[in-house]
Image: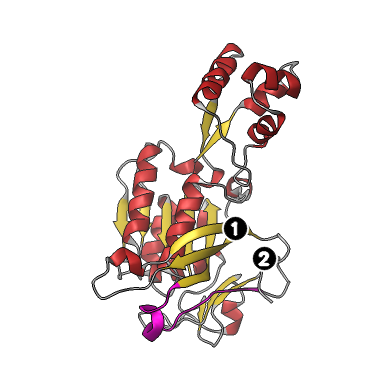
Amino acid sequence: MRVVCMLREILEKSELTKEDLCRELKVDKRTVDKLLKDNDKENWRLNRAQFYRYALFAHEHGYDAFRVVVHPIWRTFEHREGAKIFRGPRTAADVPVESHLTDYFQRLHSDGTQSMMSSDVSEVAGWMKSSNCVFIGSPKASPASEIALALLWGAEPFSPRPENRDRIPIHFLGMIPDNQRSSASVEEGPRHGLAVQVHSGEARSFLKVDRIPAAEYAAFEGEGQDAAVLVACNRPLGTDKDVTTIVIAGYSGPSTLAAAQEATSKGIPDLRPDETPGQPVFAVMKVQSKKKRQFRKSLDGLRTPIAKTAKWGPPWPGFFST
């Protein structure tokens, strides 16, 4: 969901120029340019008087000053029965993510959201075919995420066979599944991060994650790089129902939360799952986080990294690690 400034549309459908807008709103050309671009990279500011003039100006031309737009990945969630939110058995990291999504769905008038946990392939597949589903957390922490990622790309969940793994374009490297089961999308190893195949037939690219050993985590203070993946598929697994499956899987709990916040209320990639029913589309998020040192009597919040900046990719140059 994004709040869109309507000034560009007003300008395009009128005979006004940018100079006219500057005079009408009593702002400089730079502010008008930022309002017309209305992106997350260039923030614009209006004081109370300027905002009031813009609201009246928009009303005069038959427009609301702003419009709330739901991103295409959430189209089938709006004004529908509640979604199913699948999470892992270790709930601590998933609680804020689930809370954020539940609140978002209520704002979309999608009522009756249900929390789910499952490692049963048939059960998960059945829900994906019949309901809007969101899977949160990495396959390391959530068997349901493992199942969803595998099924979306026609792979067998929990099977590490190379030919099976090759079907899935997203791999989480340097992890061991919490339940000690084998995985089609989680791989052990010395490198920590996401291995992503952007285009079919190409080699996988690597997005590095700064991992702090458990023994050093409490005393660590500073910044690091994390990552997450966002997957969306309309009418998954051949279903005729107009439902969508979404996977929000961070390498860590904080990056899952950051990706969920970005996907619901900020700028995200131009993913259009409704244009390719049955075929999953995805984007990767690189996030810089900051963590404070944990003191003996500190609040729990100080132990959790806080996302500072997020960047979606590809195809931006330099997005992946070397």
Which one is in front, 274 or 33? 33
Query: In which image quadrant can residue 124 be found?
Result: bottom left
Residue 242 visible somewhere in the drawing: no
Callout 1: helix, strand or loop? strand
Q: Is-magenta flag for residue 39?
A: no
Q: In the rendered image of this protein, does residue 280 appear above or below residue 224?
A: above
Q: Give the labeled residue for mark 2.
A: 319
Q: How would you rate the neighbour count of disc 1 (Cα within 10 Å): few for under 14, some for 14-19, many for 20 or more?
A: some
**Which dot marks residue 17?**
none
- CA separation in Å, label 2 and label 1: 9 Å
Furthest residue in direction top, as rendered: 60
| Kind of residue at disc 1 | Lys
Q: Is residue 289 visible?
A: yes
Left or right of 92? Residue 195 is right
Percent across and percent down for residue 108 are 41, 38
Q: Estimate the x, y position of residue 271 in percent, counting from the top left.
A: 61, 50
Relative horizontal placement of residue 188, taking residue 15 as reference (left or right): left
Above-or-below relation of 191 to 262: below
Seen as rendered, the residue at the extreme left is 297
The magenta region covers 205-221
Q: Position of residue 23 (x, y in %)?
A: 69, 18
Q: Quadrant of the C terminus?
A: bottom right
Q: Where is residue 149 drawn, in percent x and y?
A: 50, 66
Q: Is residue 271 above or below residue 2?
A: below
Residue at the (34%, 57%) spot, across then down: 96
**In this figure, which residue is indicated by the disc labeled 1?**
311
Residues marked 2 and 1 touching at CB (< 8 Å): yes
Name the secondary structure under disc 2.
loop
Q: How is the image coloured?
A: secondary structure
Residue, x 54% and y 79% (percent of image)?
192
